Amino acid sequence: MKLTIATILISSAAAFTPSAFSGARLGNTVASDSSLNMKYKVAVVGGGPSGACAAEIFAQEKGIDTVLFERKLDNAKPCGGAIPLCMVGEFDLPEAVVDRKVRKMNLISPTGVEVNIGETLQPDEYIGMCRREVLDSYIRDRAIEYGAECVNGLVTSIDIPADHKTSENKYKIHYQEYQEGSKTGIKKTMDVDVIVGADGANSRVAKAMDAGQYNFAIAFQERIKISEEKMEFYEEMAEMYVGDDVSPDFYGWVFPKYDHVGVGTGTVVNRPAIKQYQKAIRDRAGDKIEGGKIIKVEAHPIPEHYRPRRVQGRIALVGDAAGYVTKCSGEGIYFAAKSGRMAAEEIVKLMDGGRRLPSQ
């Protein structure tokens, strides 16, 4: 889930530290005549914004084979779906991926007092509201067009050589590849040279590399289809509700989408009560969503801080897997895309056109 506060979205900066990779060379770093036609293989695990943005950088390198793993290609990830305007231009996104252009955002107190926190938006600025199944698919398809191989599969485990920090020994990825008509998937393995873990808060890549744990919030959202008349109110409007009834430590929201609204809340300190808080946010929204039909129910963990270790050997974490989320708002789509692109650009630079491997 990716939520946001208007001022954070408007002023989001690329606040990422430089990659932990260095330019040190591993073993035989000069390609021999017999290996000139060989390519190093990079696996990107996870096809959301962080993974897709990483994959499209790798895929443009002729000396690198890029494989992108995604278990659900039609995935509608639980997400508030707000992106800052800067992301549209920076990542060359068409307006078609933006369902609504929010120019008004109200913060609503427990007593019903409303404060317009979108006043800092200039006339030509907006907060983009998108559906993750649309956004993710667009960036992922672009990576495939650049040359990435997309595997519809679930990574189940990774064999990591004991000397992977000082050798060129390959990682072995175990996965289940899904094919049409198959529900369980076919067990397969793949040897790769570099891994980028972009597989979310419950990252299996992070587990395999012993990245350490982090605390997390649970976010809950219902997609509610309301009448066209009621949708007119949310044409350019998003709402955020505060108060212990909707969350003791977070906030509730009503965000407009293509033909429905996303209504949700989140909490860290009292996760078992999340459905109670969800009922409260529906009650607070009241007449504005009355008579609406719930068309989808979603829940997802949101990292509260960085993982202790985000780079180990030739494995790097990006996006939610690394913990790159704004703690106060839960916003993370932009940071996911940014971290994926930055990590891939640094790795490509250190791989020198595919002639060597990066090291820590």
Image (tube, grey):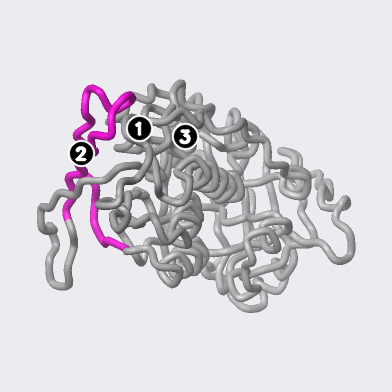
Instruction: State if disc 1 and disc 3 touch (CB < 8 Å).
Output: yes
Image disc number at residue 157: 2
Residue holding disc 3: 322
Whether the magenta-drawn stretch holds residue 158 is answered as: yes
- What's the amino acid at mark 1? Ala
> SS at mark 1?
helix
Image disc number at residue 206: 1
Marks 3 and 2 sit apart, C-alpha to C-alpha, by 18 Å
Point out residue 238 in the picture as x, y percentages from the top left corner: 70, 57
- What's the amino acid at mark 3? Ala
Front residue (pair 153, 110): 153
Q: Residues within 10 Å of mark 2 (few under 14, many from 20)?
A: some
Question: What residue span does the magenta drawing correspond to?
Answer: 150-176
Q: Residues within 10 Å of mark 3 (few under 14, many from 20)?
A: many
Is residue 112 visible in this depiction of the protein? no
Residue at image x 59%, y 75%?
Answer: 227
Q: Which of pointers 3 and 2 lies earlier in the amino acid sequence?
A: 2
> SS at mark 3?
loop
Residue at image x 89%, y 59%?
Answer: 122
Image disc number at residue 306: none
- What's the amino acid at mark 2? Ser
| Vertical relation: 16 (above or below) 257 | above
Q: Residues within 10 Å of mark 1 (few under 14, many from 20)?
A: many
Residue at image x 79%, y 59%?
Answer: 104
Q: Quarter-wise, where is residue 229 in the image? A: bottom right
Residue 25 horizontal side relative to residue 125, left or right: left
| Vertical relation: 331 (above or below) 313 | below
Whether the magenta-drawn stretch holds residue 220 is answered as: no
Q: Which of pointers 3 and 1 lies earlier in the amino acid sequence?
A: 1
Residue at image x 49%, y 40%?
Answer: 350
Instruction: State if disc 2 and disc 3 touch (CB < 8 Å).
Output: no
Front residue (pair 41, 273): 41
